[in-house]
Image: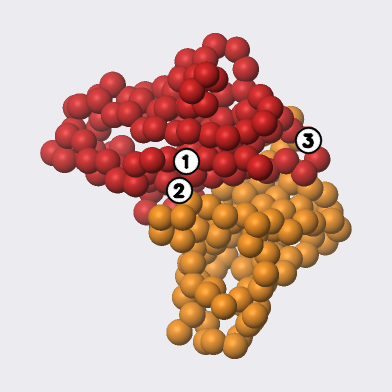
Chain colours: A red, B orange
């Protein structure tokens, strides 16, 4: 069965500092990997996705993520955090589009940004 | 604008009552999903549907029911059999092209009084 672990429940970072959110997955085949962001009381917005090719993926809002197959990881990074980045972030894993496939989400990491 | 509309955004219900959450999409997507979100537990899949008139149970389907009579609509009923229904419910859809990402609605918060 596929699963996703986000080891950090909360992270506090100063504005302008770098941010890295960890994601480890378990999946039996080549995974499709996603990072989503959620503001309080809102739906989820896709930040970026990986399905093949270059293992360093660029996303929206200045985020990037690196796929490391040997470590089963897909960590999210941002070089300089803005106050508007305060939100909850979810990593998800799924398979290629086919009948019955669905995404499995991690527990989320809440990011707090200090002025 | 294309998107997913969930209603109502907030809903209060008394114990023992059934309640139905609406989800409508105009993205022409075949697959639709319902997730439940509780603090610290991420998103857990309740039901999903790949085509009209067909749906499958997810990981936590007990106490919930769905229907898929139209491609655009995938309503979720929270029944009185759901023992802890207070939660944030998210509807999502996915097309058959592209790389499999889900598109989400804004969510519905259900509180049982």
Per the model, the C-alpha gap separating discs 2 and 3 is 25 Å
Image-quadrant location for residue B98: top right
Per the model, the C-alpha gap separating discs 1 and 3 is 24 Å
User: What is the secondary structure assignment of the residue under circle 1?
Assistant: strand
Out of B75 and B82, give the one closest to the viewer: B82
Residue reaching furthest right?
A: B53
Residue B35: percent from the left, percent from the top? 59, 56
Residue B84: percent from the left, percent from the top? 52, 75
Residue reaching furthest left?
A: A115
Give the residue number, with chain letter if any, for mark 3.
A98
Closer to viewer: mark 2 or mark 3: 2
Give the residue number, with chain letter if any, for mark 1.
A5
* Picture layout, residue A78 above or below residue A37: above
Give the residue number, with chain letter if any, for mark 2.
A107
Of the two numbered discs 2 and 1 on the same chain, state the one appearing first in sequence: 1
Res. A65 in view? yes
User: What is the secondary structure assignment of the residue under circle 3?
Assistant: loop
Q: Residue at x 37, y 54 (%)?
A: A40
Q: Are marks 2 and 1 in contact (CB under 8 Å)?
A: yes
Tally the marks. 3
Quadrant of the drawing holding the N terminus of chain B:
top right
Quadrant of the drawing holding the C terminus of chain B:
bottom left
Out of A71 and A115, give the one closest to the viewer: A71
User: What is the secondary structure assignment of the residue under circle 2?
Assistant: loop
Image-quadrant location for residue A6: top left
């Amino acid at each position: 069965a596929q699963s996703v672990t986000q080891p950090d429940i909360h992270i506090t970072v100063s504005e302008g500092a770098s941010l890295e959110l960890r994601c480890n997955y378990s999946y039996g085949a080549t995974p499709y990997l996603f990072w989503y962001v959620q503001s309080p009381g809102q739906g989820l917005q896709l930040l970026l996705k990986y399905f093949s090719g270059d293992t360093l993926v660029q996303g929206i809002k200045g985020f990037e993520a690196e796929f490391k197959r040997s470590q089963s990881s897909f960590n999210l990074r941002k070089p300089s955090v803005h106050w508007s980045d305060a939100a909850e972030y979810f990593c998800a894993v799924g398979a290629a589009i086919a009948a019955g496939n669905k995404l499995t989400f991690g527990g989320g990491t809440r990011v707090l940004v200090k002025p | 604008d294309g998107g997913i509309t969930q209603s109502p955004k907030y809903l209060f219900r008394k114990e023992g009552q059934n309640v139905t959450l609406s989800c409508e999409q105009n993205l022409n997507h075949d697959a639709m999903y319902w997730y439940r979100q509780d603090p610290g537990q991420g998103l857990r899949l309740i039901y999903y549907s790949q085509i009209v008139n067909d749906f499958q149970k997810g990981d936590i389907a007990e106490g919930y029911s769905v229907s898929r009579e139209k491609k655009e609509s995938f309503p979720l009923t929270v029944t009185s059999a759901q023992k802890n229904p207070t939660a944030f419910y998210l509807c999502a859809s996915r097309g058959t092209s592209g790389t499999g990402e889900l598109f989400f609605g804004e969510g519905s918060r259900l509180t049982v009084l």
